[in-house]
Amino acid sequence: DTAVSQTPKYLVTQMGNDKSIKCEQNLGHDTMYWYKQDSKKFLKIMFSYNNKELIINETVPNRFSPKSPDKAHLNLHINSLELGDSAVYFCASSHNNQGEKLFFGSGTQLSVL
Amino acid sequence: QKEVEQNSGPLSVPEGAIASLNCTYSDRGSQSFFWYRQYSGKSPELIMFIYSNGDKEDGRFTAQLNKASQYVSLLIRDSQPSDSATYLCAVTRSGATNKLIFGTGTLLAVQP
């Protein structure tokens, strides 16, 4: 029973393509997040949704568009992929919107060629 | 100045020793402090959190917080090779909506 699951685990694609990453949590948490971890291990928040409502939108290019159909799901769509988008993207959830005690998914390694 | 700073390491300690991991933060309004462990190729996992000045112990782990010095540390007693991982310090940034800000992590290598 995976608490936070995201797919796919690996994504290799060409520049300019559009791709999506899906995330689901079965913990009953109210808040979900997308984090990006670069090659130097720096983990940076991108978006946060609380009960399907966007509450955090960091300085992220508008090529990135999150969608939360319900509080258990948070997807990330990326348009016109660029080389600099290559990173590991982690979905996470927490009980409330205080940004604390995050439970992470296993990550999606995105490689843009 | 980075919001959360950690020495990237690697910090190498012999098996059975105490590993001491340190973190400083810039936001004086921060209220909550966390340590996550991340094994290579895996996702971060919460191992300790602390809210008040002083020490908090959980098994072999002790978190220490000094808000006046804006300093958080993690001590791992009786270090084991299985403790070898990157340890990420995280701090909530105060504001209308709290955000968890991570440091870049310290790589710990426990030598058998």
Image (cartoon, rainbow, N blue to C red):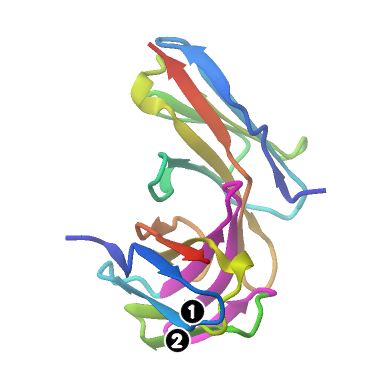
Classified by dominant secondary structure, the portion drawn in magenta counts as strand
Position in image of residue B82 (x %, y %): 34, 26
**B57 or A89: nearer the viewer:** A89
> In the image as oriented, which residue stretches furthest toward the bottom?
A69
Q: Quarter of the image holding residue A12? A: bottom left
Position in image of residue B18 (x %, y %): 49, 14
Q: Tell me which amino acid carries mark 1.
A: Tyr
Residue at image position (63%, 46%) is: B103
Q: Is residue A37 above or below residue B38?
A: below
Name the disc covering residue A49, or none.
1
Q: Is residue A58 above or below residue B70?
A: below
Identify the residue under disc 2: A67
Q: Quick check: can you spot residue B76?
A: no
Q: Is residue A43 left or right of residue A69?
A: right
Residue range of the region highlighted in magenta in the rendering: A31-59
Crowd tier of the residue under label 2, counting other residues whose Cα lies within 10 Å: few below 14, some 14–19, many 20 or above:
some
Mark with earlier residue (1, 2):
1
Q: Give x and y (percent) for residue B15.
A: 41, 11
Residue in the image at 61% along x and 51% along y:
A42
Does A82 lie within the magenta span? no
Report the residue that reaches farthest toward the left.
A1
Does A42 lie within the magenta span?
yes
Q: Secondary structure at mark 2?
A: strand
Q: Quadrant of the N terminus of chain A?
A: bottom left
Q: Looking at the picture, do discs 1 and 2 lie on one chain?
A: yes
Q: Nearer the viewer, residue A89 or B14?
A: A89
